[in-house]
Amino acid sequence: MFVRTGVPGASGHEPIPRSFEADFGARWTHYYADAMVSQADVSVVPAVVRRPRRAISVTFPSGLLLSTLSVAVMLSGWWAIAVLGIVRADLLPSPANVWTALVEILTQGYRDTTLWQNIAATLGRLLGGFCAATVVGVPLGLWMGSSRVVNAAMDWIIQSTRPLPPLSYMILLMLWLGTGDLSKSTLLFLTAFPIIVSASAAGVRGVKRQLIQAAQALGASRRAVFRCVVLPAAAPMIMTGLQIALAAAFSTVVAAELFAATDGLGWMVISASTFLRNDVIILGIIILGLLGVSLAALLRAADRLVIHWRGRD
């Protein structure tokens, strides 16, 4: 038996035996199989894996050590400036003079007030205004983020009050609410309130639509979707807004105690400035800084404890 090829020759189509075609097919199959085996053998050869360089990480003990060293360097620089007389002593008291002022206030008080009384007065005004802003601002922000109608009605009001300087309200608040703690706590409320509302609304808007659709597909009700999906997903943004609002309110509390106050750390600093007691001024600033750091650390600890799913998608 012969077959004709598709290649024209000198004398037309030359016949090729069918046995040659079968032999060629067998050879090609054998060659292809050998090639695949060789490729498989090459693919299993272990490659040289380069280990990525480890990033330098700071653990908690080393981080605490670095923070302590930075504070020690700052205090050493302050002490050196005071000892060398680079700045006059009446303008920049030495650390020893500030320590003496602390002992004096702890033992004798300052203008018929104790240090603990001033700390309690400042914290009371701060926490009163901040907690009221949290109680009112978080639900309103969640409502604005969930409802387009409420957001359209309230967003412009919130956004217009957020950039206003808090002290612009102070005179009106004193005329309306008097010169007591109510006007000062209200000022701190107005400072923290727009920040908390904006953060809460942004947290709700940032929830992934796929999560809500998945919960609805499983038969969850609207209330269950809000409680089990929207609120946990918006909680990290809400907590971040609370931290920012607390810092803003804390920076305003000193200014709030400028007007008709008889106690508080801000009052103590302003009162010391009228008597040129720079040691008391620096002492009040240091205590305010320590209080601010402590409150921020408490909020961060609550964040890690309550919102343990932060950063997990």
Image (cartoon, rainbow, N blue to C red):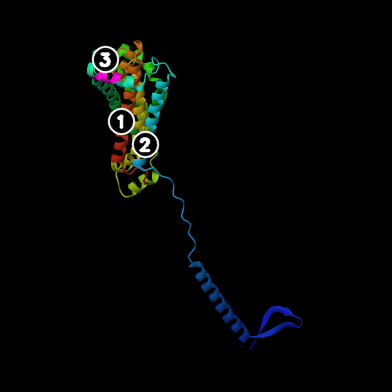
**Mark 3 closeness class: few <14, some 14–19, many ≥20 residues within 10 Å:** some
Residue at image position (30%, 30%) is 294
* Residue 21 appearing in the image: yes
Q: Pointer 2: what residue?
A: 237
Q: Does the magenta stretch include residue 212?
A: no
Which of label 3 and label 1 is nearer to you?
Answer: 3
Residues at marks 3 and 1, CA–CA distance in whole angstroms: 24 Å
Q: Which amino acid does label 3 sit on?
A: Tyr
Whole-number angstrom distance, CA of label 3 to CA of label 2: 42 Å
Q: Position of residue 18 (x, y in %)?
A: 62, 85
Read off the residue under disc 3.
110
Tell me the SS state at disc 3.
loop
Residue type, numbered disc 1: Ser
Q: In x, y percent, where is residue 45?
A: 49, 67
Q: Name the residue under label 1.
A: 294
Q: Which residue is drawn at 34% across and 49% down?
A: 217
1 or 2: mark nearer the eye: 1
* Mark pair 1, 2: CA separation: 21 Å
- Give the magenta range: 100-106
Q: Please state which amino acid type lies under the numbered disc 2.
A: Met
Residue 199: x percent and y percent?
A: 37, 32
Residue 30 lies in what quarter of the image? bottom right
